[in-house]
Amino acid sequence: MSQSPLARRYAKALVELCNETKNHAVIGKQLETFRDTWQSSPELQAVLRSSKATIADKKEILGKIFARFLFAPTTRNFLFVLLEQQRLDHVAEMVEAFNEMMDELSGRVRATVTSAVPLEKLEIGRIQTALGRLTGKQVMLEARVDPALIGGVVTTVGNLVLDGSIRTQLASMRDQLAGNN
């Protein structure tokens, strides 16, 4: 997902707040929880976007969500600001920007490995170790399955894509054969 300057600006402000309180991980998880709740509830979105509901009513609704998930004061205050500034629609990209900034500060990088069949834990561990040596960072690896790959793996680290899939190899061979005719 592409992040707007607005999302990066809000995420940066939150990172700076978290630097003071040293609760980055907690805030990150709570933001993800709110993002998931927001995205999965058209009803919540409709009420919080409504011009008919007062800001006090909207804060009361958010307060119930905060209490249910035991959100920290920093998370609550941040989300109240988003509500007041009518920025809740940008929460997903703000969470993404926040996570990227925290990864950078912590020396982590997120990666995905996609294979035609589920990989064994040992294979995932080897890929994670190799990516760690390649990037010089701690790798947070997510494994996915896509049967369309036929075989092999596709690994993505940031903007870098390492494609060792059979599908890509077959496409390359097809292109070479087509060029030789």
Image (cartoon, rainbow, N blue to C red):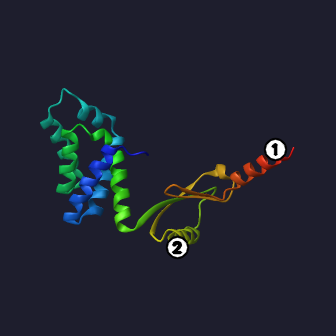
Q: What residue is shown at x 51% (from left), y 55% (from top)?
A: 159
The numbered mark, 1 or 2, whose residue comes first in the sequence reads: 2
The residue that appears at 26% across and 58% down in the rendered structure is: 15
Left or right of 127 on screen, residue 28: left
Give the side of residue 32 with respect to residue 56, left or right.
right
Question: Does residue 37 appear anywhere in the picture?
Answer: no
Residue type, mark 1 in image: Ala
Closer to us: 81 or 45: 81
Residue 138 at x, y percent in the picture? 44, 70
User: Would you name the residue on which mark 2 appears?
Assistant: 133
| Quarter of the image that includes the C terminus | top right
Q: Which mark is residue 98?
A: none
Image coordinates of residue 7 in percent, x first then y, are 32, 46
Q: Secondary structure at mark 2?
A: helix
Q: Which mark is residue 178?
A: 1
Instruction: Give the residue at x 38% y 62%.
Output: 103
The number of discs equals: 2
Q: Is residue 40 above or below residue 51?
A: below
Can residue 81 be seen at all in this image of the molecule?
A: yes
91 sits to left or right of 121: left
For mark 1, give the secondary structure: helix
Residue 62, horizontal then vertical, whole percent: 20, 43
